Image (cartoon, grey):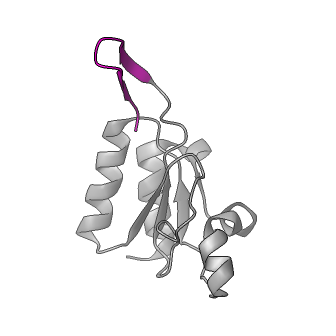
Amino acid sequence: MKKKDLFAKLVDIVGPESISDNEADMISYTSDSYSMLMQKSIPLPDVVIMPENAQQVQDIIRLANEHKIPVYPRSFGVNIAASAIPYKGGIVLDLKRMNKIYEINEDTMTATIEP
């Protein structure tokens, strides 16, 4: 799938305000403390997308799976072990907009939250 076509399909899923293929926006997703320590050169992703709900995440993953596009999930910008670095381009799935708290259970001392 061409990058332009991928971008258009992803815009259909999340809207234009929740996606970027601008180099200035994507550069922060190409490093963390581990990758800097290893001094690896990391390519830019094809796109950074910030879904707001589970349905959007599902639609993004289906599209990526259908076209064999790698997806790198990232939560709240925390990445210290190179686990969300786009080594092969693809989609960085930034989950920071998914910030709902569904339940806080004081009895079990647990919380059900997004993502």
Residue depicted at 44% across the width and 55% down the height: 10
Q: Is residue 53 visible?
A: yes
Front residue of 93/22: it is 93
Magenta-span inclusion, residue 69: no
Q: Is residue 31 visible?
A: no
Residue depicted at 37% across the width and 42% down the height: 56
Magenta-span inclusion, residue 110: yes
Can you give x and y, in whole percent of width and height, for residue 24 in the image? 75, 65
The correct choice, above or below, for 65 with respect to 78 in the image is below
Residue 2 occupies quadrant? bottom left
Can you give x and y, in whole percent of width and height, for residue 78 in the image? 58, 53
Q: How many marks?
A: 0
* Quadrant where the C terminus is found in the figure: top left
Secondary structure mainly formed by the magenta segment:
strand
- Which region shows up in magenta? 101-115
Can you give x and y, in whole percent of width and height, for residue 66 in the image? 24, 67
The correct choice, above or below, for 12 with respect to 67 in the image is above
Front residue of 39/52: it is 39
**16 lies left or right of 12:** right
